[in-house]
Amino acid sequence: MRVGILGSGLMGAKLGTIWARAGHEVVFSYARSEQKLQKLARDAKGNARAGTPREAAAEADALLLAVHWSRLDDVLKQAGSLSGKVIVTCSLPMNADDTDLVVAHTSSGAEELAKKIRKARVVSAFGTVPSEVLFGVFEARRKANKPSLVYCGDDASGKKIAAQLIRDVGFDPVDAGPLRIARYTEPFTLLIARLAYEGDGGPELAYRFERFGEKGSR
Ligand SMILES: NC(=O)c1ccc[n+]([C@@H]2O[C@H](COP(=O)([O-])OP(=O)(O)OC[C@H]3O[C@@H](n4cnc5c(N)ncnc54)[C@H](OP(=O)(O)O)[C@@H]3O)[C@@H](O)[C@H]2O)c1
């Protein structure tokens, strides 16, 4: 797949690197320094290059949106038309000092994003795990007990693409339903962040759902 990265910070840099190593064609975009994007592309050691948000979007089969909530309008403006594009967003609607959600209960960041780019196919994914765990999950991708990763969206074909990208990182994709379920997944991330950053075990934290009983037997 051709994957464009809109926001090459903690999340975008790591996920883009992983997807390049998994065999996808990756364009890193949107950082404050062009040199940083070029270094990321070199270090990814796969099929990766640096570009503008518009270039990242142009031929992408999927785009990862990984910017701070306050940068959303700016990056969307720079990306140009996203009509028909699959937008996988991990961006949480956080306030300026990252202490709380500014959208919750009656909507979600993912739904507000979808309202801004009505012709795009928005899928919410990856926002529920800390960036610190991503390389570890990728390294363990051939093991049997994979960590879960919830995702949700309203477009079936977009969700299929997102599920593949989730599998490529090494997670077991868990389809949580329509995009409005991001109202539950986004606050769940604040719990994960609490455990990752305030707990004793360190930030390399993922989660796994277990089912019991007859329906749960594999
Ligand atoms: N970090 C996590 O563990 C985590 C986990 C779950 C969800 N999220 C969510 O994912 C999203 C991305 O988080 P992150 O931690 O990856 O953020 P980040 O490290 O701050 O990355 C954001 C990217 O946007 C770029 N940027 C910021 N201002 C810019 C400007 N004026 N012009 C051009 N580029 C600009 C940054 O550039 P520079 O590279 O130059 O700084 C960086 O590449 C956020 O919405 C966050 O809530 C993060």
Image (cartoon, rainbow, N blue to C red):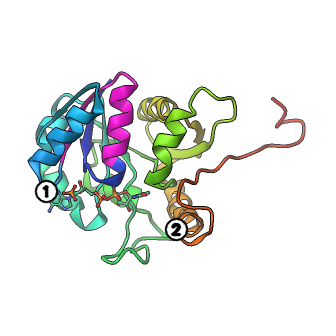
Q: CA distance from mark 1 to mark 2?
A: 26 Å
Q: Earlier along the polypeptide chain: callout 1 or callout 2?
A: 1
In the depicted view, which residue is nearer to us: 104 or 144?
A: 144
Which quarter holds ligand 1? bottom left
Three-letter residue code for mark 2 = Tyr
| Marker count (numbered) | 2
Q: Residues within 10 Å of mark 1 (few under 14, many from 20)?
A: few
Measured as percent of width and height from the top left, residue 137 is found at 54, 40
**Residue found 54% across the figure and 53% down from its top:** 204
Left or right: where does residue 208 sit relative to residue 24?
right
What label does residue 209 carry, if any? none
In the picture shown, does residue 24 fall above or below 62?
above
Residue 197: assigned label: 2
**71 vs 173: above or below:** below
- Magenta extent: 12-29
The structure residue drawn at horizontal position 82% and vertical position 37%, both measured from the top left corner, is 216
Instruction: Specify the farthest residue to the right.
Output: 214
- Element at badge 1? loop
Quarter of the image with the C terminus in it: top right
Give the x, y percent position of residue 173.
Answer: 57, 37
Is residue 153 visible to us here?
Answer: no
| Magenta stretch holds residue 51 | no
Please report contact status of discs 1 and 2: CB closer than 8 Å, yes or no. Answer: no
Give left or right: position of 191 versus 97: right
Is the CB of mark 1 within 8 Å of ligand 1? yes
- In-image side of 113 versus 140 (left or right): left
What type is the residue that disc 1 sits on? Arg
Which residue is labeled 1 in the image? Answer: 32
